[in-house]
């Protein structure tokens, strides 16, 4: 039987990208035999409309710096080049047309997966893609017990990743407080944040 070829899509605001994101993507490559993970920085994340975020180009550059030493990782500009809100359903349609013979996995964290029901065209999204949901060991996933997620339970895979309580919000807060962010993210991203005086 022919092996199913698969790619992963790791969408995010990546403000900034950190070791949590990279660890999840790397565990997904190993567990699902993904040929590639495309990191897709959002231009205008629909759920962060009222938040001040770093410019799309700077978040893109940080994502490039963080991923360029891993041959399984690539960074896509698809959402940066698209006008309007960055809806995941449009991004998945793009990858489906580029990789028609591939199974597409959208990689998310545990908090994100339970929000998908409120995203644009969730049914269409589940028809096109599988989801890999990263969880710390022991995470309960009680938010997936409702009727919507039960309908698509065969398309949601749970991936246990080592405990990593790193978050972009926490990193921004540490920079503002003048604390070190060494070991939270890639050293090239740390240097970029310092050079451009981000999050001060
Ligand atoms: P983000 O904060 O940059 O994080 C990207 C992903 O990494 C999230 O799923 C996040 O999960 C996960 N993550 C971060 N730190 C982690 C850690 N230490 N361990 C494990 N997982 C970790 O991205 P975001 O702003 O939430 O956006 C996620 C994606 O959802 C983007 O592609 C965005 O465009 C998309 N989205 C689409 C719509 C729509 O189409 N209507 C609406 C909202 C979001 P958790 O946040 O779950 O921890």
Image (cartoon, rainbow, N blue to C red):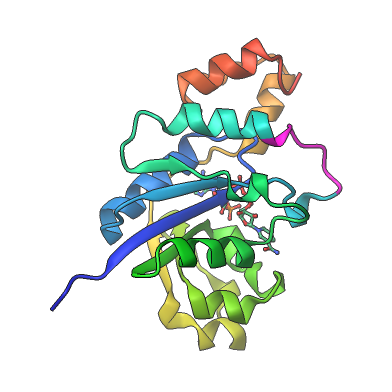
Secondary structure mainly formed by the magenta segment: loop
Which residue is drawn at the image coordinates 73% and 32% (left, top)?
54
Q: Is residue 198 visible?
A: yes
- Vertical placement of residue 59 versus 183, above or below: below
Q: Quadrant of the N terminus?
A: bottom left
Left or right: 20, with 178 as reference point:
left
Which residue is drawn at the image coordinates 70% and 55% (left, top)?
86
Q: Is residue 164 visible?
A: no
Residue 109: percent from left, percent from top: 53, 56
Left or right: 147, with 199 as reference point:
left
Q: Quadrant of the C terminus?
A: top right
Which residue is drawn at the image coordinates 77% and 50% (left, top)?
48
* The stretch drawn in magenta includes residue 166: no
Please state which of residues 182 and 41 is positioned toward the viewer in this rendering: 41
Left or right: 183, with 162 as reference point:
right
The residue sitting at the top extreme is 195
Q: Which residues are magenta?
A: 50-56
């Amino acid at each position: 039987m022919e092996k199913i070829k698969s790619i992963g899509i790791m969408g995010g605001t990546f403000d900034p990208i950190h070791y949590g994101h990279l660890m999840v993507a790397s565990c997904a490559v190993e567990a699902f035999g993904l040929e590639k993970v495309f990191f897709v920085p959002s231009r205008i994340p629909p759920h962060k409309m009222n938040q001040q975020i770093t410019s799309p180009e700077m978040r893109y550059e940080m994502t490039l710096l963080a991923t360029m030493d891993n041959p399984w990782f690539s960074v896509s500009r698809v959402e940066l080049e698209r006008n309007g809100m960055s809806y995941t359903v449009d991004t998945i349609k793009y990858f489906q047309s580029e990789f028609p013979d591939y199974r597409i996995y959208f990689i998310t964290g545990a908090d994100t997966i339970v929000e998908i029901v409120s995203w644009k065209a969730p049914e269409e999204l589940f028809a096109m893609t599988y989801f890999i949901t990263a969880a710390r060991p022991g995470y309960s996933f009680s938010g997936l017990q409702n009727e919507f997620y039960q309908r698509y339970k065969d398309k949601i895979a749970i991936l246990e990743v080592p405990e990593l309580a790193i978050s972009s919000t926490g990193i921004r807060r540490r920079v503002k407080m003048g604390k070190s962010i060494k070991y939270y993210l890639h050293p090239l991203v740390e240097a970029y944040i310092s050079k451009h005086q981000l999050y001060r």
